[in-house]
Amino acid sequence: MQHELLFEIGTEEIPAGYIRPALANMVKMMNAKLAELGLDHGEIKTAATPRRLTIGVSGLAAAQADRREEVTGPPKAAAFDADNKPTKAALGFAKSRGVTLDDVQIVATPKGEYLMVVVEKKGEKTQGLLPGVLADIINQLPFPKSMRWGAGTASFARPVQWILARFGGEVIPCRVNQVKSGLVTRGHRFMAPEEREVGDFNNYLETLRDAHVIADPEERRRAVIGEITVAAGQAGGRVMDDAELVDTVTNLVEEPHAVRGAFDEKFLALPREVLVTSMREHQKYFAVVDENGDLRPNFIAVNNTATRDQGLAVEGHQRVLRARLEDALFFFKEDQGRRLADRVAQLSGVVFQAGLGTMLEKTERITKLAGWLAQRTAPEKSAAAKRAALLAKTDLLTEMVNEFPSLQGAMGRAYALLDRESPEIAQAIAEHYMPVRAGTPLPESDEGAIVGLADRIDTIAGCFGIGKQPTGTTDPYGLRRLALGLLHIISNKGYSISLRELTARAIELYGAKCTEKSHSAQTAVLDFIRGRYLNDLIGRGIPISAVEAVTSVDFDDVIDCSRRIEALNAVRQEETFTILAGSFKRVRNIIKDHRSAAIDEKLLTDPAEKSLYKNFRETAAECEPLLKSRDYRHTMEIILRMKEPVDHFFDEVMVMAEDEKVRANRLSLLTAISRLFLRIGDFSKMS
């Protein structure tokens, strides 16, 4: 028999960003606990609003299946004495399993004869197991921050107000502090606050709809989009695309009700980023744009309740926004009283990081690094890149960024243009923070990419230089994100640069501030970036064997590594490559610590080794120009021709010959072949 479990935790308003991860964790925990108890079940559905987290488990077995368990005891030699009488070990084993010695069997195992008893375990009823499951989920559900309330000891994201725990039409006993579980839910806090009894999961959703609560997040999201679309249309425009804000608002309301507001057109003089941020960051208002994508003097707010006097509600929103925009306009005008270039010296009063000096010192370092990078990637952009690096952090000193930290970079661009800096420099100031996180836009300009790389490697090198590298899941300085951004910028721009040289230069610029030895810090940084590179490619579906085959040999030029990985990945399924990779593994095992690749043709006597040497020379000569031009795909096609000569060599030739000179010469031949192959990667890791 099967029933449905409906479990709802009703709370005070949970922060919007907590809800989606909490639901995912509830499903994960429920799956794990039911599997541990051996309880079969069907689909697990979820629902959530700011005041509730809910899961519904369909087709949950009414009881565990009966189990037959074979329990092995002590060996026969220890269970019976010389007179074949049971010892304490045998008697104790039988007693511990609740059986008599007559029920104990002797079975043969690979380790000898052992006592064994068959125990029939009757499955427990699910009704009796669920209280522990639900209590564990409530007590163990992780949140970025939890709180305690009242005199109770339990903690949760917000105080728990009610619990709905229903299975097979009956309540599952469960409690949090003084709150006991029941069979009822609650509707909208203001429009339908009374308790309501529910049936199955679908009835639960329908009952809440009638109580002005859209519990299905996807359904509520569609409702939000529908409301704001209609409201924006009434303003003569459309809502500016902002999926992140839609997600946030979806988890701020239980039933969305959009209202349209307006603001004075004088505020359109503010930079676009300022207007949008003023609306979305604190007020969670949607900006409205016209058919050309230009901002209109309107906004859309989403209320959690329907209002009798919409005009009064709109006036309230407009009053709040007007005050914030007046502040923004004041800050914007005040900031224009000083040029960005005049603020550089003031960065000496801003601490970059404990142990790593000030933002002025960081600015000086990234300016030098930007020049170094520009000379190796886009020499003609060197002056602009260095100027952008010099000004990149100055907007941190502005009133606007102090009020809206998320506008750093964007305000730097706006003020740079007002200071009559070149558009390239202004754009680079904004772009050097890109990507903000994985999947967000990358710098388009070389200047922005160069300054972004300089900024990131400076932070990574500095943290490693004072022993502040990430450990386990701890990464307080966001170095993993910075390293991934660095790799994505390099890949996107196709920059062929030496990470080894770049890291060494970055560490060198810190001078005496580094407490770690320079070489150790450099090695640690490269290993760290290599780890991010490895995880990133594997996450994109590139086989780990191909990635490790290349990066285990050399990790310095990201573009070069990527090309070699692509070449190996392209041929890895070919039978010829699989066999050659196996042979190369044999080569690597045979040569071990042999270092010399000098071959004496006079010592080549066997036809098979002469043939291998001839093929190797021809292959190496043909590969050399391709390797120089980094055409690794065609290089691999040529290298694959070595399969037959290598196989024939191993079939016909004894490498470890008795003659020491002949043996060494054959090892040198294999070493030379190995070095050619290693210029692409260590094929042996793919065998």
Image (cartoon, grey):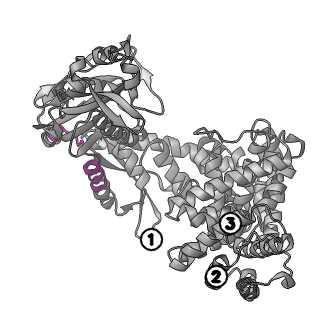
Evaluate whether residue 433 shows in this view: no
Say which amino acid is labelled 3. Answer: Val
Q: Earlier in the sequence, mark 2 or mark 1?
A: 1
Q: Which residue is mark 2?
A: 648
Mark 2 or mark 3: whose residue is earlier in sequence: 3
Which residue range is magenta in the image? 208-226
State which quadrant residue 376 falls in: bottom right
Report the residue marked by disc 3: 558
Assign the magenta stretch its main secondary structure. Answer: helix
| Quadrant including the C terminus | bottom right
In the image, farthest residue toward the front: 83
Foreground of the two, 385 or 106: 106
Going by the numbered disc 1, the residue's amino acid type is: Asn
Q: Position of residue 6 (x, y in %)?
A: 20, 34
Instruction: Describe the element under mark 1 as helix, strand or loop.
Output: loop
Q: CA distance from mark 2 to mark 3?
A: 36 Å
Q: Which residue is mark 1?
A: 292
- 94, 577: nearer the viewer: 94
Q: Quadrant of the N terminus?
A: top left
Residue 674 in view of the camera = yes
Say what secondary structure mark 2 lies in. Answer: helix
